[in-house]
Image (tube, rainbow, N blue to C red):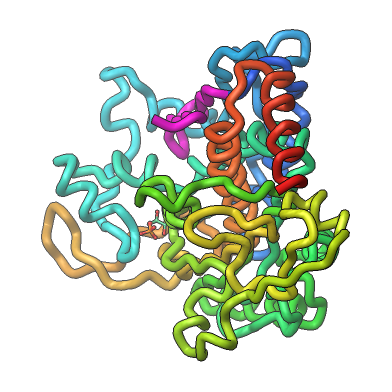
Amino acid sequence: MTALRYITAGESHGKGLAGIIEGIPSGLSLHADDIDRDLVRRQGGYGRGGRMKIESDHAEILSGVRWGKTMGSPITLIVENKDYKNWSQGMSSEASAEGAIPAVTRPRPGHADLTGALKYDHRDVRNILERSSARETAMRVALGAVARKFLSVFSVRVGSYIVQIGTRKATDDVQEVKEKELLDLFSRAEGSPVRCPDEKASRSMVKLIDRALREGNSLGGIFEVFVTGLPVGLGSHIQWDRKLDGRLAQALMSIQAIKGVEVGLGFEMGRRFGSEVMDEIFYMPTRPHVVKGGNMRGVYRKTNNAGGIEGGMTNGMPVILRAAMKPIPTLRKPLRSVDLITKEQIAAAYERSDVCAVPAASVIGEAMVALTVADAFLEKFGGDNMSETKRNYDSYMEYVKKF
Ligand SMILES: Cc1cc2nc3c(=O)[nH]c(=O)nc-3n(C[C@H](O)[C@H](O)[C@H](O)COP(=O)(O)O)c2cc1C
């Protein structure tokens, strides 16, 4: 049983999305604006399809918050689908609306369409694609914003930036050690149309997206998510499902189209000698900034190849994760497929689609990481109200300083 539980519901063209998060202590200041800020960030990025021009997401808080403060009860969020007005019959829950729009019978390769239709016994693929669509991630981002707000009370920050789109790579060495440099990469990424801190690479990525758009094709890429300010000792080495690296990998991998996750140097570790990979441990009698970051007094590392996690536990260094996203599977120049009813070889269905959504995926990655880290944080420090959580946190930090 986790300390923080959450669940989402809703279809891509249904009335809206709903989410419930339970386990946030009482007394946390929370406003719809805190959530909307991240919803706007998710909708951005060069290469998005027409849908994003229709939607301007806003979260309504339905429960769990009174007069700007959490009450300790489950927090329910709703994000309306503005596009629903065009789908009110096609997505109606009423039996009388059946057949209002034609069935989708041409499954798209790379989607949940074919396997989902078979598994759930649907002849209309819409019954699958409506839920497998990444529209659902708007609610993950909304819930993630709540986790982010909780973490901010403890000066924990979560950010992300893009390091690759297609073949175009950022040249910046992103394996940074220091909090300040990570935050700098993040703020530069926020100003880039593709959320890439390297300006030259950004321009090149935009050009490649334009080419994919012209050719009816699509692109994927790689992004990094970091967390700064985490105390040492979140997660645990003692059991497979308590290991924080495993939990973070699952959280990121669960995002639509994410096909690979790395922690720190990740796969590169497999290509190097041990002496080139491990982060050696040093001691200096007073290193107050390290203490502030949550590390043990005087003990520090010069490198962060581990990406802030050793033995499934945070080690006080920034957590650094990388995720690879495959290209968008719906192509304007469609791939070959088979009609579910006639069994004819035909072109896969095309529905207004993104050409590249890596920048948006990185914001979703932040949300999933914030939720996972907040869960590990509450597991360690507990607390039904924020004062209690803070007391527990402060006392642990005192202990760490004296260790
Ligand atoms: C932010 C984001 C936006 C996406 N937009 C689209 C899209 O417009 N069209 C599409 O076919 N797939 C899109 N996808 C990818 C599909 O949702 C995903 O590939 C599909 O659900 C199958 O899941 P899988 O790739 O994890 O196997 C998007 C994914 C993300 C994270």
Residue at horizontal 80 percent and vertical 82 percent from the top: 200
Whether 11 is among the magenta residues is: yes
Q: Residue 156, relative to residue 180: is it above or below?
A: above
Return the residue nearer the eye: 96 or 199: 199
Seen from the viewer's position, the closer of residues 89 and 224 is 224
42 sits to left or right of 339: right
Whether residue 132 is visible, yes or no, is yes
Residue 227 in percent (x, y) is at 68, 54
In the rendered image of this protein, does residue 348 appear above or below residue 158?
below
Quadrant into which the N terminus falls: top left
- The residue drawn where x is 64% and y is 83% is 168
For the residue pair 83 and 176, the one nearer the viewer reads as 176
Q: Quadrant of residue 138?
A: top right
Picture coordinates of residue 142 (x, y %)?
62, 35
Judge whether 197 appears above or below 393 on screen: below
Please tell me in which quadrant of the rendered image residue 96 appears: top left
Residue stretch in magenta: 1-23
Quarter of image, ligand 1: bottom left
Question: Which of the two residues, 390 or 250, is positioned nearer the viewer here?
Answer: 390
Q: Where is residue 335, by image quadrant? A: bottom left
